Amino acid sequence: MTLAIGYVGLAALLGWALRGQYGHQLGATIPGVLFSLALVLVSGRPDWMQRAPLIALAGGMGFAVGGSASYGILIGYTRSRVWSNVLYGFCCLFVVGGLWGAIGGGVVGLVLESTPPAWYELCMLACCMFAGAYVIYHLLITRCGIRMTPPRSDAWAYELGMALILLPFLSTFGYNLALRSAIFGMLGFGLGFVLGNFLQVLGNASGIPFGWWKVMEKSMGFVGGAALSYGILSTNAPVLQPTSPVLNWVGILLVCVGIPWAVLHRRLSFARLSKRFSELPFQNVEQTVTVRLLAARVSVMLCVVFMLVAAALYTVGSLPAYSSWLLILTFFSLSGIIMSNLQSGFPKDRFESRVVEVSLWLELAILIFLATYRSFDQSLVLEGLASGPPSIYPLITLVSVILVLVSTVSFFSHRQHLPGAHLRWKGELERSLSGERPSIKKLGTLDCDIVEANPVVFKGNVYRCEYLKDKYSGNATGDSYFRFVNRESGDTTPPFARGFHMGSAFVDLDTVYVSAVNHWDGERIHIFKSDDFTHWESWIALDLQGYGMFNTSICKTDEDYVMMFEVGKPPEVTGVRFTARFARSRDLHDWVLTPPECTYSKNRYTAPHCLRFLDGYFYNFYLEANDGYEHRVVRSKDLVAWEASPLNPVMKASEQDRLIANPHLGPEQKQRIASAININNSDMDFCEHEGSLIINYSWGNQKGVEHLAEAIYEGSLESFLKGWYPGGTQT
C-alpha cells in the first residue's frame, strides 16, 4: 500500500512541477492526468484500466478548475514576522488547496462509481456548479467585500461555490466513493499546500540559495496526490461496468492529443520564443528558434503518436492494459518535460534552472523503473477498510493542530520579514513601522538609452512599459515608440504609439492604459487603451494650448482617477520648471483640470513622475535638484497642501546603480555603464507583485545619457507608502 500511494504521489509531484511551467487551468490538467493514470496502474484492477481514458480525462478537467486560484500573496503572508498574519496565510493556503483537491478528487471519484451519473445529470451538475460559483463570488466578493488575497484575484470564491454544489450532490445521491475522494482530496491538497509552503519558508529562512519555490510545488503535488490516492485505494470500491469504446477513444484523443497540442500552441509559438530569444547571445535568433521549435514539435508529435499506438494496441488486444497505460503515462510526461525544457532550460544558463529541469527527467525515470521492476497488482492495495467518507471531526482537529504548529515554527524560523513578506491588516502594518526608512535594494542596470519606464501587473504577470527613443540601439524604425516587456520571460509586445513620448502605463480591471505626450514640451496628452497588448485605441485626454508637458502618471482613488502631469510652461503655471499639475476623470476618457492651486511645486525644481493614492493621501514621487538629482516623496489630501517625508530622499545616485541586472548586456554596454557619469536617480515608478515592490528608475548625467535600472522593496505597497511617514509624522 505504501509503495502504491508513494507511486501516485510521485506522479502528482511530477505533474505539479510541470503545472508550474504553464500555469493556470491549462497547466493544472497535467497533474490531474498523471495522478489518474498512476492511480489506475497501482490499482491493478482490470475494470479501472478499461475505463482509464475517462478517469484520466476526469482528472485533467477536475484539477483544471483549481488552476484559476491565486495563492502567491498568501505565501507572502506566511513570510512575515507577525504570528497572526502567518497563521492567516497558512489557513488561506489550506482553503485554496483544499478546494482544488475537493473538486478534482470529487470529479475523479464520480468516474470510479459503478453507476456514474448519466450524461444529462452531469450536464445539470456542471450548470449548477457554474451557477453556484457565480452566486458565491457575487455574494462574498462583490456584495460583502470578503477578500482573501487583495489585490490579487479572488477566484477561490468561484471554486467555493462549485464545491458547495458538488459535495451535497455526492452526499444526497449516495456517491460515497466520490464523496470520500473529494474529502481526501480536500484534506490532502489542503495540507499539501500548507506543508509545501512550510518547507519553502524554512528554506528561505536558512539562507541557502536554492529553488525553494519548486520544492514547494513538488511537495504540494506529492502530499496531495498520496493522500487522495490513499482515500480512493483504501475503500471497497465496486466493480465497474465496461465503458463504450467510443467514449474511451474520446477520452484518449482529448488527453493524449488535445492537452499536449494546447500546451504547445499556447506556450511555444514561434513569435513567443523569438521574443524570448531575441535578447540572448545567438548569432541567428530566427534560425535558432526555428530549429529548436521544430525539434520540440516533432518530439511532442512522436510522443502523441506513441500514445495513440499504445492505446490502439490495447484496444485490439495486442498489448496488455498495464503496459499500455504505463506507456501513455510515460509519453504524456515526456511531452510535458520536452516543452518545459525548451521554455525554461534552453534560454537560461543558471545552475538552479538546470537542476529543476534535470530533476523532471529523474522523476520520470523513477516512475518507469518502479512500474517495470515490480508490476503493481491488487494484492498491493488494501481493500475493504472503508465504505464511505471519513468522520469529519477528527480531520478538523488534525488540520487545526497542523496549522497552528507550522505557523508557530515558521514564525520563529526568522527574526525579520523574509523577502516577499506581506501584511494583511493595517494594524499589523502600523505596528511593524519602526521609524526606519523603507529599505530599497538596487538590483542594477537593465539597459542603456532607456528612460521613463514603469512596471505594471497585467493579468498576473509583471510587464515593463518602455519608451524607446529613435536613438535607441535596437530601434530601427527611425521614430520613437512604446512596448511592453515581460519581466520574467523577456518577451516583448509589438510596438505601438509611434511618434509619441514618455509613456506611462496604468492597469485597471484587466485593461492597460498608457498616457503619453505628442512630443517633448507637448500641448496634448493622449491615452492608449488595450486588453491584449496588440489592439490599441486612443483618444486625446488633455489639449492645453500654450502648455509644455512631459511625464504623466495615473492613479485610482475611491471615487475617480487622477492624472499628474509635468509642465514646463507657461511660466505663470510652472514657476520654476518643472512642476506637477493635475486632472481628474470618472471614466479615464474625459478629463478636467483641477483648480490652479493644485500644484507641486512652483518655487523650485520638483519634476514629478509617480503618483499613488492610499487612505485619502496622494503620494507624489518627484525629482529634486540637490547635490545632483534625487528622488523624494511628498503627500497631500487635497493636492494643494503637501507634507514632505522626514526620511527623504527616497533614492539617490550610488555605485549600486552600476550593478548588472541583465546578464545579456554586451561588453560595450557594460563598459558604458562602468564609465558613465552618475549624478541622478530619476523617473522612479513601481508596482506591487507577490508581496514585493518592483521598482524601475533611471540614472545617468541628467543630460540625455541615461540607463534603465531595477530595484526592489521587500514589502507591500501600503507598507512602502506609509513607511515614509512613521507614526503619522506631520512636518
Image: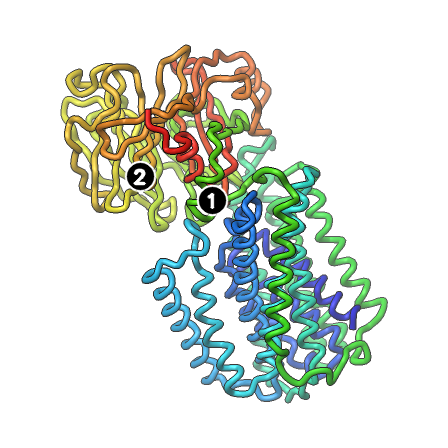
Q: Amino acid at mark 2?
A: Cys
Q: Is residue 488 above or below residue 662?
A: below
Q: Quadrant of residue 326?
A: bottom right
Q: Secondary structure at mark 1?
A: helix
Please indicate, yes or no, whether residue 485 appears anywhere in the rendered image: yes
Q: Tell which residue pokes out farthest to the right in this image.
A: 373
Q: Which residue is mark 2?
A: 555
SS label for mark 2: strand
Please say whether residue 342 is visible from this viewpoint: no
* 268 over 9 or under it: above or below: above
Asked if residue 115 lies left or right of residue 379, the reply is left
Give how far across and how far down residue 714 sits, in percent: 52, 36
Give the side of residue 268 with respect to residue 455, left or right: right
**Residue 411 vertical placement versus 193 (above, below):** above
- For label 2, count other residues whose C-alpha is less than 10 Å away and answer few (under 14), some (14-19) or many (20+): many
Q: Position of residue 42 (x, y in %)?
A: 75, 73
- Residue 699 located left or right of residue 304: left
Depth check: give the residue in front, 409 or 290.
Answer: 409
- Residue 282 or 402: which is nearer the viewer? 402
Which of the image's four quarters has the N terminus? bottom right
Which of the two discs, 2 and 1, labels the residue nearer the N terminus?
A: 1
Q: Quadrant of the C terminus?
A: top left
Residue in the image at 23% along x and 18% along y = 602
* Amino acid identity at mark 1: Glu
Q: Give the number of callouts.
A: 2
Instruction: Measuring from the top left, give residue 696's x and y in whole percent.
Output: 45, 30
Q: Could you classify mark 1 by the number of other residues whose Cα lies within 10 Å: few (under 14), some (14-19), or many (20 or more)?
A: some
**x then y, percent, for residue 29:** 57, 64
Q: Which residue is mark 1?
A: 428
Look at 79% across and 68% down and name the residue there: 3
Q: Are marks 2 and 1 in contact (CB under 8 Å)?
A: no
- Of tags 2 and 1, the one toward the viewer is 1
